[in-house]
């Protein structure tokens, strides 16, 4: 690993995720952008404390055959409350997002743009979306704002960035999308297919 | 996650101070004092008022906290539920629980039983949760999921008749919801047949005393439990201990056979006597008084019956008994099948009252041959006398008893499983 | 040692010792015909138990 250190306090940074683009310095809590082996100070805005959750940063957990270690999280505000998106790595170092909202935990695998559902920008609750030959009903739709982060993240996040989201739950799977307007007037979207995890089945690694 | 962990408001209808419970997903709040429904998303504006509600019989109050499955939960809402069928009514109370880390679940109080339910998302065979499908089945429907076997228990049509506290949806009083439930050991899986999505709930029975203790109430505050609940855990026998203990005792019993064999004492070894040498008197030096003595005879009679007269005198020369012992043997061929009948052996068992030399006299008692068959009276009789005999049947009975004890645990569970399923509404007719 | 284990152990031991003792003593091991013959000798009839064997 290249020697990166915090410009603020000098503490050496050793991200566990090789492709980390943003870290919060564990010593002084400053956010650092990692760009081509260089460190750029991003200030201490947006750095949050962890809220009680079934998983904790840096602690490996198991759920059946799944083994993950959360390294960082983004916190979104949806109005009446917030939810966290944990960036987790598996033992092989591959990353995946885990959404945690009041005990609802969903492991979200990104859907490549080419396979993503084609939708109109005027989606409403109850509308059907076709994906993988199945009809998915929109069960939730809303707007979220990024209000903070902590730990290691795979991209540089920007405070107060807003996006729309929609969720279609079907049995034990969740099809969800983040939507945002592009400058050219079209809609940008990022789709993922999620698998629900039962928080009561989360097992912490003992002695970790 | 709620941004504020605890807030208090004043009910806009009655002015009562109310704690805002639950997380960010709470949609409405019903004031427990005046039963006015408030919009939890839009600044707690009064939406409507429920009139004439009767609080269900529950000692639990909003805001109480307790630990279930090792996780701290708070009671944030209370629903009264009723099922009406053929003029009868069943009432129970459901308490909505909230945990900051694990979300929402239910604590139900049903016939004095405490039950904990939570939402699950499993891949289940959908048709098994359609009432029409279940009604068509001849045998109790069942399936395997998540490593257990689920048997159809019952279908329930329930209505909420009381509401207080916070809810993540808008509760509607009087709306009928129908659900089907399946039973596994100690767990009930309920699927509510909704319009778009089927909601699955997993219910576990909780020990009353533990629930009362963790929520800080007295167990006597809970209504008395009525009978067993189908979700009650099955009697957990100590199977390994039972099998080991019963097995060791059975092995000891088998070893005992060897011991018993060793202490039998042969008074007259197996010895043939030609019929021409009868009657004959044999001395039997008995050493074990009051133990079983066996006099065993074998004859070589063919297709007939041959009897022997036995007489036994005790050491003092008194007659102990005189009796006849019959041997018989018939055989032949019928429709190409070979058959045999009768017993060429005869056994006489008794308990000599004293030790000393007994005298046994054996005499020819005569024979009866089957007419028309190539029968032959016996030409010799073989005698054998043993003292200190034992009854093998008691050992076998003991082994059967130990087998029963070893199998008691699984058998008890099997019966308990059947009894629990009988609580449901399935009728094999 | 739980009460269940104690009771179970006692049950197994009782079955083992009980059936062992009953087998050793040969309880109910005497055959009925001999017992009747002994009985009739004691009653002073001097026998007369011949001929009650069943003849095919």
Image (cartoon, rainbow, N blue to C red):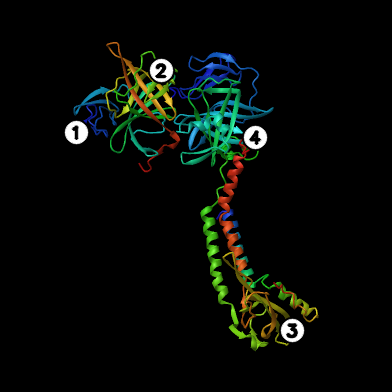
Residue placed at 30% from the left, 38% from the top? Answer: A91
Q: Are marks 3 and 2 in contact (CB under 8 Å)?
A: no
Q: Are marks 1 and 2 in contact (CB under 8 Å)?
A: no
Q: Position of residue B1 (x, y in %)?
A: 43, 25
Residue hosting label 2: A142
Tell me the crowding category of disc 4: few under 14, some 14 to 19, or many 20 or more residues within 10 angstroms, Cα based.
Answer: some
**Residue at mark 3 shares a chain with residue at mark 2:** no
**Residue at mark 3 shares a chain with residue at mark 4:** yes
4 or 1: mark nearer the eye: 4
Tell me the crowding category of disc 1: few under 14, some 14 to 19, or many 20 or more residues within 10 angstroms, Cα based.
Answer: few
| Mark linked to residue B223 | 4
* Residue B379 drawn above or below residue B147: below
* Residue A37 drawn above or below residue A189: below
Residue placed at 55% from the left, 60% from the top? Answer: B246
* Relative horizontal placement of residue B147, taking residue B429 as reference (left or right): left
1 or 3: mark nearer the eye: 3
User: What is the secondary structure assignment of the residue under circle 4?
Assistant: loop
Residue hosting label 1: A3
B270 or B370: nearer the eye? B370
Residue hosting label 3: B319
4 or 2: mark nearer the eye: 2
* Relative horizontal placement of residue A109, taking residue B286 as reference (left or right): left
């Amino acid at each position: 690993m290249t020697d990166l250190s915090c410009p603020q306090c000098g503490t050496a940074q050793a991200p566990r995720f090789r492709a980390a683009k943003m870290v919060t310095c564990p010593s002084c809590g400053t956010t650092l952008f990692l760009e081509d082996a260089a460190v750029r100070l991003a200030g201490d805005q947006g750095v949050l404390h962890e809220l009680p959750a079934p998983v904790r940063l840096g602690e490996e957990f198991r759920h059946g055959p799944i083994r993950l270690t959360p390294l960082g999280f983004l916190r979104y505000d949806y109005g009446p409350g917030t939810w966290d998106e944990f960036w987790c790595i598996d033992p092989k170092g591959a990353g995946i997002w885990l959404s945690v909202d009041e005990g609802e935990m969903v492991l979200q695998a990104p859907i490549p743009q080419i396979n993503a559902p084609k939708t109109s920008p005027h989606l409403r609750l109850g509308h059907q979306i076709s994906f993988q030959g199945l009809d998915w009903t929109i069960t939730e739709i809303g707007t979220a704002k990024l209000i903070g982060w902590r730990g290691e993240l795979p991209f540089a996040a920007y405070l107060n960035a807003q996006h729309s989201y929609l969720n279609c739950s079907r049995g034990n799977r969740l099809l969800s999308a983040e939507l945002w307007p592009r400058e050219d007037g079209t809609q940008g979207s990022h789709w993922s297919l999620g698998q629900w995890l039962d928080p009561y089945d989360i097992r912490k690694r003992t002695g970790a | 996650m709620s941004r504020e962990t605890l807030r208090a408001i004043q009910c806009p209808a009655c002015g009562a101070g109310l704690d805002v419970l639950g997380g960010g997903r709470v949609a409405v709040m019903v004031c427990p004092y005046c039963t006015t429904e408030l919009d939890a998303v839009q600044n707690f504006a009064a939406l409507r008022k429920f009139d004439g509600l009767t609080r269900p019989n529950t000692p639990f109050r909003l805001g109480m906290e307790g630990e279930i499955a090792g996780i701290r939960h708070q009671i944030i809402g209370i629903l009264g539920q009723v099922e009406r069928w053929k003029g009868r009514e069943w009432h129970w109370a459901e308490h909505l629980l909230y945990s900051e880390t694990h979300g929402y679940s239910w604590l139900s109080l049903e016939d004095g039983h405490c039950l904990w339910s939570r939402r699950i998302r499993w891949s289940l065979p959908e048709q098994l949760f359609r009432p029409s499908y279940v009604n068509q089945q001849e045998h109790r429907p069942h399936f395997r999921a998540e490593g257990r076997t689920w048997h159809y228990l019952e279908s329930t049509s329930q209505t909420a008749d009381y509401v207080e506290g916070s809810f993540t949806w808008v509760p509607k009083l009087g709306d009928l919801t129908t659900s089907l439930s399946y039973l596994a050991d100690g767990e009930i899986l309920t699927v509510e047949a909704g319009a778009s999505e089927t909601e699955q709930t997993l219910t576990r029975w909780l020990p009353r005393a533990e629930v009362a203790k963790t929520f800080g109430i007295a167990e006597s505050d809970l209504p008395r439990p009525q009978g067993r609940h189908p979700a009650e855990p099955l009697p957990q026998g100590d199977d390994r201990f039972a099998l080991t203990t019963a097995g060791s005792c059975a092995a000891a019993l088998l070893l005992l056979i060897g011991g018993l064999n060793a202490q039998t004492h042969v008074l007259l070894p197996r010895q043939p006597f030609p019929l021409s040498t009868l009657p004959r008197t044999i001395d039997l030096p008995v050493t074990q008084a009051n133990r079983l003595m066996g006099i065993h005879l074998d004859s070589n009679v063919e297709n007939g019956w041959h009897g022997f007269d036995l007489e036994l005198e005790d050491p003092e020369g008194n007659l102990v008994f005189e009796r006849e012992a019959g041997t018989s043997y018939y055989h032949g061929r019928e429709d190409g099948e070979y058959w045999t009948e009768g017993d060429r052996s005869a056994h006489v068992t008794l308990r000599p009252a004293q030790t000393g030399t007994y005298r046994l006299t054996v005499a020819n008692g005569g024979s009866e041959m089957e007419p028309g068959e190539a029968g032959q009276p016996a030409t010799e009789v073989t005698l054998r006398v043993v003292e200190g005999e034992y009854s093998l049947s008691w050992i076998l009975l003991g082994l059967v008893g130990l087998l029963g004890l070893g199998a008691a645990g699984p058998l008890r569970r099997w019966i308990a499983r059947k009894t629990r399923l009988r609580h449901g509404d399935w009728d094999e007719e | 040692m739980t009460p269940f284990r104690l009771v179970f152990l006692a049950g197994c031991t009782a079955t083992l010792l009980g059936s062992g003792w009953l087998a050793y003593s040969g309880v109910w091991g005497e055959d009925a015909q001999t017992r009747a013959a002994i009985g009739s000798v004691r009653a002073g009839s001097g026998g007369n138990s011949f001929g009650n064997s069943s003849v095919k």
